[in-house]
Image (cartoon, helix red, strand yellow):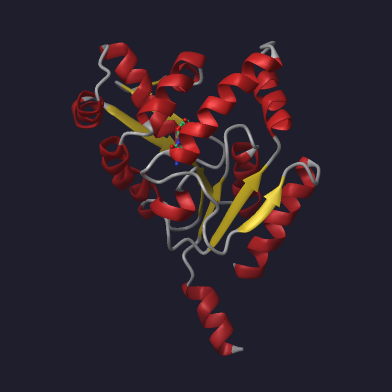
């Protein structure tokens, strides 16, 4: 018993949630962070913010884009509910959730130099929030935080995800969203560096099997077994 309690006490208060685009990772991880009273990190914001900067500076090679990470004045700010992208001291988060940014973010996420250069910033988010962090993305459990205490992988069928994304972005036609989503899935799954896949030992949740509330409850119950 003492051993079990000791093990519990020594665990990093860190949960990762990975899965494909529009599977509901952000909503799930945000709710879970809220229930646990932990901070929430959406690692996609790093790729989105960098894509925004690349569009602004009109650069598009791997080296030029990666060099913006050191050159530009940006930061990522987090709390229980929001991961914000700050550029020149201004919160520009809404501007990194556009279709143009989606497309470029997906492309630059395939650049190994970009991933490698962003990784220490992503890891730094846990160093600054060791009192509890839920991090979501594509490679959080496999590459960014391989020692996370709980790794969740969220799956959902294509049409469920496309309907979610179409709804999030106003009245986009679902067919158009499915086409873009398929391209993004291929890029996420087939990139050589940190491809999207379930981490070893992941707790898998299928968003098609349960309501959102049930999904949060499953993740919360699993967390309470550990923390
Ligand atoms: O989750 P999102 O849609 O905000 O992610 C934006 C882009 O960044 C998407 O193309 C996938 C990529 N991404 C990634 O490659 N690795 C992560 N850990 C998070 C996001």
Give percent across and percent down for residue 198.
55, 53
Give percent across and percent down for residue 14.
49, 58
Indicate left or right for 116 with 224 as reference: left
Q: Nearer the viewer, residue 213 or 60?
A: 60
Q: Which quadrant holds the N terminus?
A: bottom right
| Image: 43 above or below 73 | below
Answer whether residue 127 is visible to the viewer in this image.
Answer: yes
Count of numbered circles on the image: 0
Q: Nearer the viewer, residue 135 or 86?
A: 135
Give percent across and percent down for residue 40.
52, 44
| Image: 180 above or below 24 | above
| Image: 38 above or below 108 | below
Q: Nearer the viewer, residue 108 or 137?
A: 108
Indicate left or right for 209 with 108 as reference: right
- Kindly indicate the quadrant of the structure image that contains residue 8: bottom right
Point 46% across, 14% down: residue:
100
Point 37% across, 22% down: residue:
51
Point 29% across, 35% down: residue:
114
Q: Which quadrant holds the C terminus?
A: bottom right
Give percent across and percent down for residue 187.
46, 32
Answer whether residue 83 is visible to the viewer in this image.
Answer: no
């Amino acid at each position: 018993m003492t051993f079990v309690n000791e093990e519990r006490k020594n665990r990093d208060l860190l949960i990762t949630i990975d899965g494909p685009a529009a599977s509901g990772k952000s909503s799930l991880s945000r709710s879970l962070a809220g229930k646990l009273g932990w901070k929430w990190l959406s690692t996609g914001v790093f790729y989105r913010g960098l894509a925004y900067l690349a569009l602004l500076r009109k650069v598009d090679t791997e080296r030029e884009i990666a060099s913006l990470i050191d050159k530009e004045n940006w930061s990522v700010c987090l709390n229980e509910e929001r991961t914000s992208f700050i550029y020149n001291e201004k919160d520009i988060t809404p501007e990194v959730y556009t279709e143009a940014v989606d497309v470029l973010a997906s492309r630059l996420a395939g650049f190994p130099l970009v991933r490698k250069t962003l990784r220490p910033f992503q890891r730094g988010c846990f160093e600054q929030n060791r009192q509890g962090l839920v991090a979501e993305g594509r490679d959080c459990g496999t590459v960014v935080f391989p020692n996370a205490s709980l790794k969740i992988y969220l799956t959902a069928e294509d049409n469920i995800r496309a309907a979610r994304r179409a709804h999030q972005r106003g009245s986009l036609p679902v067919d158009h969203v499915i086409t873009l989503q398929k391209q993004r899935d291929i890029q996420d799954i087939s990139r050589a560096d940190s491809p999207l896949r379930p981490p070893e030992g992941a707790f898998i949740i299928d968003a098609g099997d349960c309501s959102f509330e049930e999904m949060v409850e499953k993740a919360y119950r699993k967390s309470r077994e550990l923390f």
